[in-house]
Image (tube, grey):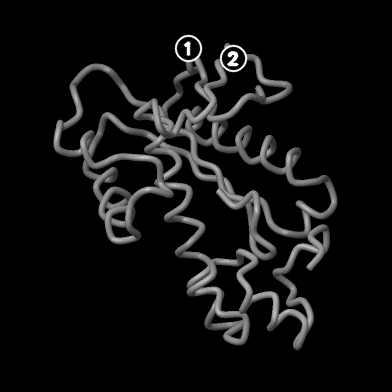
Amino acid sequence: MGRGPLAGPVCTCGILIRQDSPLPQDFIDLVRDSKKISPTKREYIYNKIFELPQISFGISLIDNKTIDEIGIQKAIFKSFQNSIKKIQQKTKINPNLILIDGNQKIPNLIFEQETIIKGDDKIFSIALASVIAKHTRDTLMIKLSKKYPQYDFKVNKGYGTKKHIKVLKEFGRSSLHRKSFKF
């Protein structure tokens, strides 16, 4: 999450779901593309995963300075690589297959990958990863809003709303803003 914002990090999440016991159906039914469910549901899902031993996950954040240095696409790939490493470190398991939302494989990854366009609409594990990543990033931006109240990150989460752009023109960029984005 966080490909398009003017401020803040990009956040990715990798999910490993062990098949030894099924997930509760009511939980499965809740999970959708993160952009299609409310912040309250995203928070509930995020908290619920800590109760489900079948699920391991790794979250990675790449800051705006790194995004400006290497570009958004490379930052996303780096974040995915970090997420996968975190899962491996936690579980000591190498994935059989990495499912990726979109049409680009992660470079320099030794595991088999399958890209799925609109995967967060089609595949439970991709949708769950999108929920966790969005909740994580949004929560961070809400916290950062206290340090930078004029930018209203608690509302816009760093995205380029009309109000955010107006404030940028008035106050300039904060240390969280991506210089690679023009406004």
SS for dot 1: loop
Tell me residue 104's x, y (percent).
66, 25
Q: Which percent across, then down, holds residue 147?
A: 59, 82
Amino acid marked by disc 1: Asn
Res 18 quadrant in image:
top left
- Residue type beneath disc 2: Phe
Q: Say if mark 1 contacts mark 2, CB within 8 Å.
A: yes
Q: Is residue 178 left or right of residue 25?
A: right
From this view, report whether residue 181 is shown above or below residue 170: above
- Which image quarter holds the C terminus? bottom right
Circle 1 residue: 96
Using a 10 Å C-alpha cutoff, classify the residue at mark 1 as few (fewer than 14 neighbours), some (14 to 19) or many (20 or more).
few
Residue pointed to by mark 2: 111
Q: Quadrant of residue 148?
A: bottom right
Residue drawn at point x = 64 percent, y = 76 percent:
164
At x 49%, y 74%, the residue is: 154
Residue at left 50%, top 17%?
94
